[in-house]
Amino acid sequence: MCSLTGVNNSENNNRIKIMTIKNVTLLTVFLFFGSWSIKAQQFGYVEIGGGGYVTSVIGCPAEPNLFYAKTDVGGAFRWQESSKSWKQLFAWVANNQTSYLGVEALAIDPQSPNKLYALVGTDYWDGGKTAILRSSRKKGRR
């Protein structure tokens, strides 16, 4: 029989029981909350002319299937659930506003999911123009 040095067998058994109870409790919590997991979703590719990469995707807790992706040099995109595709939100950018295609941050207004805020600007284009943009979608227009 093996025992911990300086610990008698009854203390050792109590420690094992406590560890077992903790493990069973953690497993129960994991299995319980694991059944509430988010359904896996598959998204399509985002075409970004000239290269670049998607730096993050955010979702709206108040509106299912509302997702936005931000990129380092390609602007921002909104997930179109109906067509299972991404829509470019910065197609309006003029030639002297290309720095706006570098999206640093996106935020959805928690009080109004139709409002999206974007911190944009890339220092190596157009003299580093920077802006905070706000978009509001009309209901029914996606």
Image (spheres, rainbow, N blue to C red):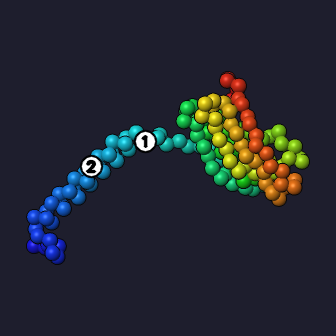
| Residue drawn at x 14%, y 71% as measured from the top left | 7
| Residue drawn at x 89%, y 47% as measured from the top left | 95
Classify residue 21 as left or right of residue 63.
left
Residue 140 at x, y percent in the picture: 67, 23
Task: Give the structural element (helix, strand or loop) at label 1.
Answer: loop
The residue at the far right in this view is 96
Residue under numbered circle 1:
37
Query: Callout 1 environment at 10 Å: few (<14), some (14 to 19), or many (20+)?
Result: few
Vertical side of 10 occupied by 114: above or below: above
- Work out whether residue 68 or residue 21 is closer to the camera in this orientation and state it: 21
Comparing labels 1 and 2, the label whose residue is closer to the camera:
2
- Which amino acid, mark 2? Thr
Vertical side of 113 occupied by 125: above or below: below
Residue 39 at x, y percent in the picture: 47, 40
User: Which quarter of the figure is the N terminus placed in?
Assistant: bottom left
Query: Callout 2 environment at 10 Å: few (<14), some (14 to 19), or many (20+)?
Result: few
Residue 48 visible from this viewpoint: no
Classify residue 111 as left or right of residue 37.
right
| Residue drawn at x 68%, y 33% as measured from the top left | 115
Residue 51 at x, y percent in the picture: 75, 56
- Which amino acid, mark 1? Ser
User: Residue 63 sits in which quadrant?
Assistant: top right
The residue at the far front in this view is 6
| Residue drawn at x 18%, y 62% as measured from the top left | 15
Residue 96 visible from this viewpoint: yes
Q: Compare marks 1 and 2 and give the one earlier in the sequence.
A: 2
Q: CA distance from mark 1 to mark 2?
A: 19 Å
Task: Give the structural element (helix, strand or loop) at label 2.
Answer: helix
Residue under numbered circle 2:
25
